[in-house]
């Protein structure tokens, strides 16, 4: 895989993680036309494809407050096609990035406000783990307003696990996952205040494992992050 394909895959990750899967939001964040972003996302060989040059990579990383050279790094934190760029890889060990806020609704639904704001001082074995700051009391006392949830998208999910769910129609939830005899997902309220929600597998877009709930004292501002 050459460096341009590596950057394209990283751009897809940025779109899905920070822009709710929307290329238009990605375009807005980097102040480019949506058609320009779409061309950068084209697979190799497609007519009109725009490769991500070094200056554009730097702009994207700055726009999303990512470490310099992040788009040229593989998921395991090792250098990809290029190895001359600096990357604060050691910063990642023991810290999980906070990518936004989860505003809790009355029925366990979650309104996402995505932005890069800092880090949580906690170790995760998932290189793609991320944190969300929780606002609202609908999951009290299990999750209290002002606390953070650590989410691991690559950790296998089993019945009884707490999960962050995004449906195909764009609804977000933090629930307990179980399965029905028919193989559908059944999502239960964490504090048992609401009826379970049953959804066919094909209606679930993403389901990520909630690995931890941590206090605000674990939060570290970007400027205070130790460099090792």
Image (tube, rainbow, N blue to C red):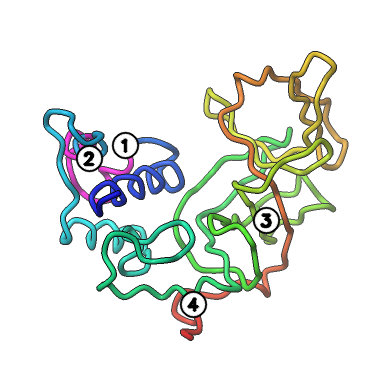
Q: Residue furthest front?
A: 1
CB contact under 8 Å: marks 2 and 1: yes
Query: 10 Å neighbourhood of mark 2: few (<14), some, or many (≥20)?
Result: many
Q: Which residue is mark 2?
A: 37
User: SS of the residue at dot 1?
Assistant: helix
Q: Nearer the viewer, mark 2 or mark 3?
A: 2
* First along the sequence among labels 2 and 1: 1
Identify residue for label 1. 23
Seen from the viewer's position, the closer of residues 165 and 81 is 81
Does residue 93 sit above or below 176 in this rendering?
below
Side of 212 relative to 18 (left or right): right
In terms of secondary structure, where does tag 3 sit? strand
- Find the distance from the CA under tag 2 to the CA under tag 4: 31 Å
- Marks 4/1: CA distance? 30 Å
The numbered mark, 3 or 1, whose residue comes first in the sequence reads: 1
Asked if residue 33 is among those painted magenta in the image, a careful observer would answer yes
> Of the residues tagged 2 and 4, which is closer to the observer?
4
Local SS, label 4: helix
Which of pointers 2 and 4 lies earlier in the amino acid sequence? 2
Counting residues from the start of the chain, the first of labels 4 and 1 encountered is: 1
Residue occupying the point 45% across, 73% down: 89
Mark 2 or mark 3: whose residue is earlier in sequence? 2
Q: How far is the residue under mark 4 from the one under mark 3? A: 22 Å
Q: Is residue 78 left or right of residue 128?
A: left
Give the residue number, with chain letter if any, for mark 3: 149
**Residue 72 got which mark?**
none
Q: Which residue is mark 4?
A: 90
Q: Residue at x 54, y 43 (%)?
A: 112
Of the numbered discs 4 and 3, the one sitting upstream in the chain is 4
Q: How far separated are the C-alphas under marks 3 and 1?
A: 26 Å
Q: Are marks 2 and 4 in contact (CB under 8 Å)?
A: no
What kind of secondary structure does the magenta stretch mostly adopt? helix
């Amino acid at each position: 895989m050459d460096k341009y394909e590596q950057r394209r895959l990283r751009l897809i990750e940025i779109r899905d993680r920070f822009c709710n899967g929307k290329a238009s939001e990605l375009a807005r964040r980097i102040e480019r036309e949506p058609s320009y972003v779409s061309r950068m996302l084209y697979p190799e060989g497609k007519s009109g494809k725009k490769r991500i040059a070094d200056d554009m990579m730097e702009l994207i990383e700055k726009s999303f407050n990512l470490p310099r050279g992040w788009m040229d790094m593989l998921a395991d934190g090792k250098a990809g096609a290029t190895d001359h760029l600096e990357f604060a890889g050691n910063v990642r060990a023991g810290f999980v990035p906070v990518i936004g806020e989860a505003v809790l609704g009355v029925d366990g639904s979650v309104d996402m406000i995505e932005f890069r704001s800092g880090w949580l001082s906690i170790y995760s074995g998932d290189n793609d783990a991320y944190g969300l700051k929780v606002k609202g009391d609908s999951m009290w006392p299990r999750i209290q307003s002002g606390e953070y949830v650590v989410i691991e998208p690559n950790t296998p999910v089993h019945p009884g696990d707490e999960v962050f769910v995004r449906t195909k129609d764009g609804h977000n939830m933090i629930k307990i996952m179980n399965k029905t005899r028919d193989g559908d997902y059944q999502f239960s309220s964490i504090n048992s205040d609401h009826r379970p929600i049953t959804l066919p597998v094909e209606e679930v877009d993403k389901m990520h494992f909630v690995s931890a709930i941590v206090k605000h004292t674990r939060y570290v501002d970007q400027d205070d992050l130790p460099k090792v």
